């Protein structure tokens, strides 16, 4: 049975998952090992060594303040990927229970919760995040709070929709006639059906959040200097683009590869689960 | 003694959809009552109301002399222990992601204070209990570890029956339990239900549009049409006295 699952995931149809996993391994190892290979302090200013090209000491050269670019990229990776993951995990922890309760209990509870959700959803993501960052002040923490506030709703809605279909299933009714508590029925029969969709969504969402954080930092509403967040690094490099375009190319590539990685993982996992579901149906 | 009395039961889904109209009947301890009627006549609605999955607007349901209170937790719990249901679609009544033994044990886990009579010794593991249950419905104990997708339709319905009788209920509601099965398997399932009824002294409310299945299992039959009861008779009287024209049409359709 296990080999069958592995075979499905490695089959030709799932190039996405394989590429995504390879990329993830690459990014993770650079992030974890990279720091110790290049023992530079990402914050250490060295005005004598500004805008250096790559060398055996500074593998990717230095920026306009003489800081080691690779060290800053690696530090930025931990920050960007870590924060993106935390934001989505928190959004899931809020949104999924709300969606489960709303969908399963229905009635007034559902009406109230969904009214709140629709209210918040009527504002576009980006505008709402800008407003919140504007009100709370521009820094990474506030940006993350804004992202969580915007994203939990999406999970609540999607999960509610899934629950509405799941709870019509006869085995859910059987569970009720067996006098299982709502919590037990949800845990035993509904949550397991919902989890794959949440995982797929989360993988794609982490990519989106990384892009969002970088965009916000780039326009000055996210990470503030000297924090080496990738978007902030893009912003830093902008004034020196004529002299040293690589200052923008490196963080750009880092963002691109990471977002690509999460998208590939998301798509790959989606077809992986679809195949398995298809098998289940036959 | 009547185990279940339904008095003047009406159910309205929407303004112009009345699924049940002032339905009254009673069920005697130990008998099996057949409910027949064409598609849409309200049979499943009746079953779902009786099992507490659906609300109703008018009428009263009395089980073992006390009115059922679907909103109160403790009486509902006691009621569900005593009244179990078998659903029409054998496959979708089992969670495809759970091994058979887990599905089988869900009801018993919720009534841990209750020990059914088929458990004769203490200290049985969950798997042991599930295997005993499988034995009760004539299934091999090695099915316990399988998943629903690895069972035939008839085997699945047997598992559903095993789960329903695990609490040793006094009333078993069967909503077209054979409709999703092949004819030969249908007979096996009906035979199993008949045997279990005699062994465990269960009262059965057997719903079907297949009047042949009903005559196989039931001594008494009521006929539903558009939510109303249009006929009721003892099986022995089926050919003796003059029957309602609707009943005749049903009999003709089944070429009986
Ligand atoms: N949840 C519901 N909401 C609205 N209308 C419903 C619902 N369930 C059933 N109905 C309607 O109530 C009527 C009776 O349906 P019911 O399912 O009880 O019939 P049935 O006798 O079981 O039919 P079948 O033999 O096809 O299973 C039908 O007109 C049906 O469309
Ligand atoms: Mg029906």
Image (spheres, grey):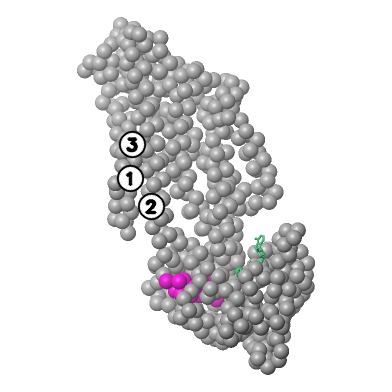
Residue A221 at x, y = what percent? 52, 20
* Of A177 and B122, the residue lying toward us: A177
Q: Is residue A193 left or right of residue A136?
A: left
Mark 2 to mark 3 CA distance (whole Å): 22 Å
Residue B172 at x, y = what percent? 60, 76
Mark 2 to mark 1 CA distance (whole Å): 10 Å
Which mark is on residue A275? Answer: 2
Q: Are marks 2 and 3 on the same chain?
A: yes
Decide: few, some or many residues near mark 3? Use Cα within 10 Å; few <14, some 14-19, many ≥20: some
The reply to whether the magenta stretch includes residue B158 is yes
Residue B214, image quadrant = bottom right
| Chain under callout 2 | A
Of marks 2 and 1, which one's residue comes earlier in the chain? 1
Q: Quadrant of ligand 1?
A: bottom right
Name the residue at 31% across, 42% down.
A15
- For the residue labelled by badge 1, is the local secondary structure a helix, a strand or a loop? helix
Name the residue at 25% across, 19% down.
A59
Q: Quadrant of the N terminus of chain B?
A: bottom right
- C-beta proximity under 8 Å, tags 3 and 1: no
Q: Residue furthest bottom?
A: B240
Decide: few, some or many residues near mark 1? Use Cα within 10 Å; few <14, some 14-19, many ≥20: many
Question: Where does the magenta region start and end?
Answer: B152-167
From the image, give the main secondary structure of the stretch colored magenta. helix
Classify A221 as above or below B1.
above
Of marks 3 and 1, which one's residue comes earlier in the chain? 1
Residue A245 at x, y = what percent? 33, 13
Of marks 2 and 3, which one's residue comes earlier in the chain? 3
Q: Which residue is mark 1?
A: A14
> Which of the two discs, 3 and 1, sits closer to the camera?
1
Q: Which residue is mark 3?
A: A24
Residue A266, image quadrant = top left
- C-beta proximity under 8 Å, tags 2 and 1: yes
């Amino acid at each position: 049975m296990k080999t069958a699952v592995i075979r499905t995931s490695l089959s030709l149809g799932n190039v996405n998952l394989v590429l995504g996993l390879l990329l993830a391994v690459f990014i993770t190892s650079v992030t974890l090992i990279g720091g110790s290979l290049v023992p530079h302090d990402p914050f250490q200013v060295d005005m004598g060594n500004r805008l250096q090209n790559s060398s055996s000491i500074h593998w990717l050269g230095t920026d306009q303040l003489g800081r080691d670019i690779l060290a800053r990229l690696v530090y930025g990776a931990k920050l960007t990927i870590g924060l993106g993951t935390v934001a989505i995990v928190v959004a899931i922890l809020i949104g999924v229970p709300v969606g489960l309760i709303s969908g399963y209990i229905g009635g007034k509870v559902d009406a109230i919760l969904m009214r709140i959700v629709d209210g918040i959803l009527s504002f576009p993501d980006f505008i709402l995040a800008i407003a919140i960052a504007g009100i709370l002040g521009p820094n990474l923490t506030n940006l993350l709070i804004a992202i969580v506030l915007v994203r939990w709703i999406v999970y609540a809605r999607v999960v509610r929709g899934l629950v509405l279909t799941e709870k019509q299933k006869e085995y859910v009714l059987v569970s009720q006639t067996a006098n299982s508590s709502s919590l037990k029925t949800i845990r035993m029969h509904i949550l397991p059906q919902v989890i794959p969709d949440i995982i797929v969504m989360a993988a794609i969402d982490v990519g989106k959040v990384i892009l969002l954080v970088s965009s916000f930092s780039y326009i000055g509403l996210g990470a503030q200097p000297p924090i080496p967040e990738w978007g902030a690094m893009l912003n830093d490099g902008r004034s020196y683009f004529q002299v040293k375009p690589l200052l923008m190319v490196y963080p750009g590539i880092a963002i691109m590869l990471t977002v690509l990685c999460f998208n590939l993982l998301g798509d790959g996992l989606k077809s992986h689960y679809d195949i398995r579901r298809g098998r289940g149906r036959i | 003694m009547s185990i279940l009395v339904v008095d003047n039961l009406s159910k309205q889904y929407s303004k112009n959809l009345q699924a049940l109209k002032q339905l009254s009947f009673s069920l005697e301890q130990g008998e099996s009552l057949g409910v027949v009627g064409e598609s849409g006549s309200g049979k499943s609605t009746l079953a779902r109301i009786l099992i507490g999955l659906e609300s109703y607007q008018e009428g009263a349901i009395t089980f073992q002399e006390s009115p059922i209170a679907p909103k109160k937790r403790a009486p509902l719990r006691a009621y569900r222990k005593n009244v179990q249901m078998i659903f029409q679609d054998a496959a979708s009544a089992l969670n495809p992601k759970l091994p058979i033994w887990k599905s089988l044990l869900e009801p018993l886990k919720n009534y841990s204070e209750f020990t059914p009579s088929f458990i004769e010794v203490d200290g049985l593991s969950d798997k042991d209990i599930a295997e005993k249950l499988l034995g009760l419905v004539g299934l091999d104990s090695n099915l316990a570890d399988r998943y629903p997708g690895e069972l035939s339709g008839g085997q699945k319905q047997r598992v559903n029956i095993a789960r329903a009788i695990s609490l040793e209920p006094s009333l078993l509601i069967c909503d077209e339990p054979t409709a999703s099965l092949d004819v030969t398997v249908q007979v096996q399932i009906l035979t199993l239900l008949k045997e279990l009824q005699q062994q465990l002294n269960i009262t059965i409310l057997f719903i079907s549009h297949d009047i042949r299945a009903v005559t196989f299992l039931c001594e008494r039959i009521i006929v539903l049409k558009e939510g109303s009861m249009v006929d009721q008779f003892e099986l022995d009287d089926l050919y003796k006295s003059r029957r309602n024209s609707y009943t005749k049409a049903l009999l003709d359709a089944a070429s009986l």
